[in-house]
Image (cartoon, grey):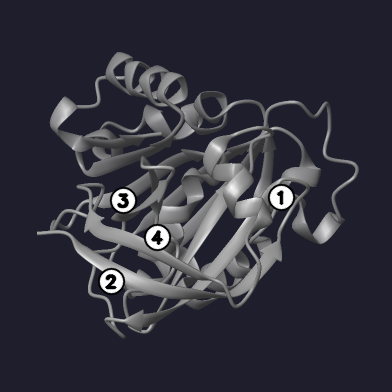
Amino acid sequence: MLITYKTILSVKKQLTNNVFLFSFKLIDPSEINFVPGQYLILKVNNKPRLYSIASSNLEKNKIEFIVELVPDGRASTYLANLKEGEEVEFCGPAGQFVLRESDKQKIFLVTGTGIAPVRSIFKSYTLHATRYKLFWGLKNYKDTYLLDELKQYSNIAIKQFEFKICLSREQNLNMIPETDRKYFDLGHIDKCMEKILNSKFLILNSEFYLCGSRNVVDSLKQFLLSKNIPPENIVFEKF
């Protein structure tokens, strides 16, 4: 059964030109319980919009979302005009894009704001409990955000967490500070991760979590199937 949550916008932070972090304080009920990877539903003029929770499920009295504001979009226009201190209602939680209980390595393939539910997973679980790899597709270096946060996870988990930000529209990495270039690669996600799919052990002992636009997720799923990834080891969510 879905619950209606009354909230107040407490923080609205611009991450890039059109991507924002929204943080809401829960008012009634004052706490939320959800499984990392799930979403909440926002109704704008009675039209539902689904937003993956980007915050930790250990923080019971607030929820965060990472949202790309699309010009002239109904929900985007509403959120763009929303001011800190205003009240907003959400329903939920819902969704099945959650980690399976297994010892398999978790490999995340996400594009754009598909990072939101993955951020919730990273912030909620102890990363050194298993191995994690993240391949995050963005168009340009200027679209990058959360880099310092991801670097912290990498330092804490040592070799248990590795990530690559895959830039599809850059010709080189010269604009990136030299100390950060190891976290980036050129090309789409499939090109960036192809080198790791030569290991039969990795193929059989990994679960793949895909999140992004419908076309991208469908394409990535077909790519993994072409590499003999068992379909039962592919979990996905489209938006």
**Residue at numbered disc 1:** 144
Q: Amino acid at mark 3?
A: Lys
Q: Are marks 3 and 4 in contact (CB under 8 Å)?
A: no
- Residue 129's disc is 2
Pick the front one: 74 or 16:
74
**Residue at numbered disc 3:** 106
Q: Nearer the viewer, mark 3 or mark 1?
A: 1
Q: Position of residue 237 (x, y in %)?
A: 32, 37
Q: Are marks 2 and 3 in contact (CB under 8 Å)?
A: no
Q: Determine whether the residue tagged by mark 2 lies in a helix, strand or loop.
A: helix
Q: Are marks 1 and 2 in contact (CB under 8 Å)?
A: no
Q: Determine whether the residue tagged by mark 3 lies in a helix, strand or loop.
A: strand
Label located before the other in sequence (3 or 4) = 4
- Give the alpha-carbon distance from disc 2 to disc 3, as whole Å: 11 Å
- Give the alpha-carbon distance from disc 3 to disc 1, as whole Å: 22 Å
- Give the alpha-carbon distance from disc 2 to disc 4, as whole Å: 22 Å
- Residue 53's disc is 4
Q: Determine whether the residue tagged by mark 1 lies in a helix, strand or loop.
A: loop
- Give the alpha-carbon distance from disc 3 to disc 4, as whole Å: 19 Å
Label located before the other in sequence (2 or 4) = 4
Along the horizontal axis of the image, is 4 left or right of 52? left
Q: Is residue 128 visible?
A: no
- Give the alpha-carbon distance from disc 1 to disc 4, as whole Å: 19 Å
Q: Position of residue 168 (x, y in %)?
A: 68, 27
Q: Measuring 26% from the left and 47% from the top, which residue is drawn there?
A: 97
